[in-house]
Every structure is written in structure tokens, then in C-alpha cells.
Amino acid sequence: MDQVLAEIEFLARSANRGDVLTLVADSPHGRQALAEKTGASQPTLGRILRDFEERNWVAATEAGYTATATGRLVAAGLTELSESLAAELHLREISEWLPTDDLGFDLGRLGEATITVPTQTRPSAPISRVIELIEAAGRVRIFSHAFNEQTLAAVVEWVAAGGEFDGIFSAAAIDAVAHETALREQLHQLHAADGAMIRVLEAAIPLAVTIADDTVSLLLRDEQGHLQAAVDTDDPAVRAWAAERHDQYRESARPLVEGDLAVDS
């Protein structure tokens, strides 16, 4: 293990080392081409290439320096580690609210996601971001454990303008709406719209996910239910997961009926 850590430290001490190894693992490069792409001086490149040759990571060929099989192995691991760390840094501030047990995809897929958090001047910024995605879409699918007034109002207006909506909500969410006059009336309007289908799932839905055309958005809340962030991405793996989860819930859910919105006197 000490030797492994020593090799990691060797690569980490110089960004040029990782860049050179990645480049020659992709295709043969001469020293001039490596200098142009990395910005490293010729003496620096000479030391790097000698160190790599001693480790049998690269070999000099007529086409230029190229990675050996073991060099490609190290380069692949370095790329994977770099991408994982970049994703972790991107997600670090919101990581404690990510429902990792319920996400069926690698978190690295969110490494380039758009993250919207509340601010002092825009406390509802995450909701506004989701609404923005909905209003730009032609088809929206949702599965969620909660409603919020802003999003519901926006969806009602968007469906009236021709949008196609397919929402699945937990029975607990529907019951909460039934006891809020403004939300109940909005949901009545949405339920009556031609372009909307609303279903109720008796089981709990642990996530709040919106699929607006090809973009998936997750609303993240803390343990007290306070909204902390919206995370959206068009990553294909995340989109496939969200669509599959929506279909799974859809199979178990039933259509919303007017009785669901009746309030016991």
C-alpha cells in the first residue's frame, strides 16, 4: 500500500505528469506536440518521459511517445479519479441532502449538473429553476411526495397553453393539498385539463423529480422539509433512471378522482 500511495503522490505532485500520460494514452505524441498541449518546457517533459519510461508506462515509437498497456491502465484510473473528485467537489455543498439510497445511478453523473440554491434575495430560486424548465418543455413527467403552490400554478397555466403533463403523487401529498384551499382549487383545474393526467400512489415516494423533455430535475430538502437545492441534468443515464422510475410508479398508481380532494367536514 505504501508503494501505491507513493505512485499516487508521484502523479499528484505535477499536473503535467497526468496531462502527459493521458495524452499519450489517447494517441502517440511527439515532444513538441506535448509541449504545445501541456505548456510544459522541454526539460520538464524530458524528466517526465524518463520517469514514465522507467516505470514502463510509455515507449518511444516512430509516431511519437505512446502509452504501454500498463500506462493506459494508470491513465484510465487517473481519469476516473479526476472525474470522481471533480464531481464530488461540484456536489460537496449539497451532498448531505442528496437522497443517495434512492438514486439508481452513479453520483458522478451529476458532476456537470446545474445546481440552484436559495439565496437571501431569491429564497425560492430552486423552485423558479424547475418552473423555468417546465415552461420551456413540451412534455413534463413528475413523481413527488409534495406539492408547492408556485409550481402547481405554473403547471396549470402551462397545460392550458398546450403542455402535456403526467404527474404521480403520493397519497399523503394529495391529502395535504385537499386541506389547502388554494392548492386544492389549482389541482382541480389541472385535473380537469385535457393535457393532464394525475395519478395517486398509496405508497411513499421518497423523491421529488421532474422530467421536462430531456432534462431531469431533483428538488432536495433537509430533514425538516426545507428546500435546499434544485439539481438538474440532461445526462442520459439519469434520464433513463428517472423515466424508468416514473414508469414503475405509474404501474402501481391509480388515477386521481374528485373524491381524493374532498375535505371531510
Image (cartoon, rainbow, N blue to C red):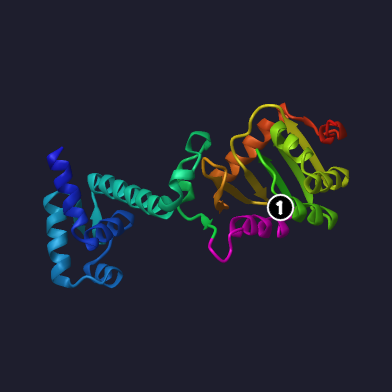
- Residue 44 found in image quarter: bottom left
In the image: residue 4, left or right of residue 239: left
* Residue with the mark numbered 1: 151
Query: What residue is shown at x 61% (from left), y 49% (from top)?
Result: 216
**For this rendering, which residue is in front, 87 or 265?**
265
Left or right: 160, with 237 as reference point: right
Considering depth in this image, is 19 or 71 the residue closer to the camera?
19
Stretch in magenta: 119-138
Q: Quadrant of the C terminus?
A: top right
Callout 1: SS = helix
Rendered position, 20 above or below 96: below
Q: Where residue 25 sits in the image (x, y, percent)?
A: 29, 54
Task: Using a 10 Å C-alpha cutoff, classify the residue at mark 1 as few (fewer than 14 neighbours), some (14 to 19) or many (20 or more).
Answer: some
Residue 176 is situated, as x and y percent measured from the top left of the image, at 72, 38
Quick check: is 150 in the magenta stretch? no
What is the quadrant of the N terminus in the image?
A: top left
Q: Quadrant of residue 180?
A: top right
Q: Residue at x 20, y 54 (%)?
A: 11
Left or right side of 155 for 93: left
